[in-house]
Image (cartoon, rainbow, N blue to C red):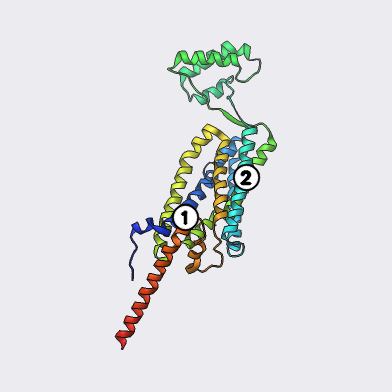
Amino acid sequence: ADGEPAWSELLHGRVFRLLILGVSLQLLQQLVGMNAFMYFGPKIFEAIGFDKNSFTTINNFVNFLSTFPAILLADVAGRRSLMLSSSIGMTLACAVMGGCGLMFVVQEVPCLGVPGIVAGYISGNSTLIAATAAATNLAGTKLAGQCGGAFFNATLANALNASVAGPVAFPPEITVANSSAGWIIAISAFFFVFNFAYGFGPIVWVYCAEIFPLKYRARCIGVCTMANWVGNFIIAQFTPMLLSSIQFGTFLVFGFFCAISVVLSVWLPETKGVPLELIQKLFDKKSGFKTTVEGKRVGEAASDSSSEESENSESSGSE
């Protein structure tokens, strides 16, 4: 009877605050970093000595199996409880990965003393290969078996700079100083995926589908879905930059958003077992929503009033 709501109606009152909540949940679902593991996990773990195909297989298997607890427990443990425990688990996993990575994962200059390796980096450029060979011949007696010795590097830099405009940078290699740390990082990654898959991954979608009034639900969920894809774009675009600049500190950034998810999950009301028509009442005493209670009641009263008038007019007409 009321027709389609105007988009502008989503920007006022309680609906707007619920929309902010839904958008925040969807953005956090991406910013905790799950898709960073999916997109860049094989590359990261290959760099610290694991087989990338094995990592991908195990990671996907853990993700698949861990989704089933969400199906079984959503109406038993509750939405809020699953998101809270999931967020705590993800925060711990990110803290361990970031901490171990910063302490035990190091970047080393590649072995410049081997012309074949250098030639691989400079991709067949005959001028640079010739300069490298010259530097190797000059510095070889000083290397004494050391890879990337200081005298060799200086000689190579002089030879290269004499041949090309500007210095040449060689990509560093990532190594794990402690093999146990590598396993701890890998297990923490799977623990992160497990926690995401039973909680913050699927349950955010369930929660967003429940909290909006029926009149605005379709459009609000559409906006929330768009927010999810915006978060996905942010992760895909900026994760390589973070990995390049702060390496395993990237997981501490993800851990920060996981911690925000913990705080938000503590605040959320539990919707388990509550009829959709009554879910709005759960927010009446929540900070940020108290000022919208009166407006909601006025709207409900107006709706009830119009319904009564409609029924009265119909009964009058039938008489």
**Secondary structure beneath disc 1?**
helix
In percent of the image, x 46 and y 17: which residue is there?
Answer: 127
- For residue 89, side relative to residue 9 (left or right): right
Whether residue 84 is visible here, answered yes or no, is yes
- For residue 297, side relative to residue 50 (left or right): left
Which of the two labelled residues, at mark 2 and mark 1, occupies the earlier sequence position? Answer: 1
Mark 2: few/some/many CA within 10 Å (<14, 14-19, 20+)? many
Give me the disc on residue 22: 1
Q: Name the residue under label 2.
A: 93
In percent of the image, x 58 and y 36: which residue is there?
Answer: 248
- For residue 136, side relative to residue 234 (left or right): right
Instruction: Please identify the quadrant where the C terminus is shown.
Output: bottom left
In-front residue for pair 160/273: 273
In-front residue for pair 267/256: 267
3D distance between C-alphas at marks 2 and 1: 25 Å
The residue mark sitting in front, 2 or 1, is 1
**Secondary structure beneath disc 2?**
helix
**Above-or-below relation of 117 to 26:** above
Residue 201: percent from left, percent from top: 54, 54
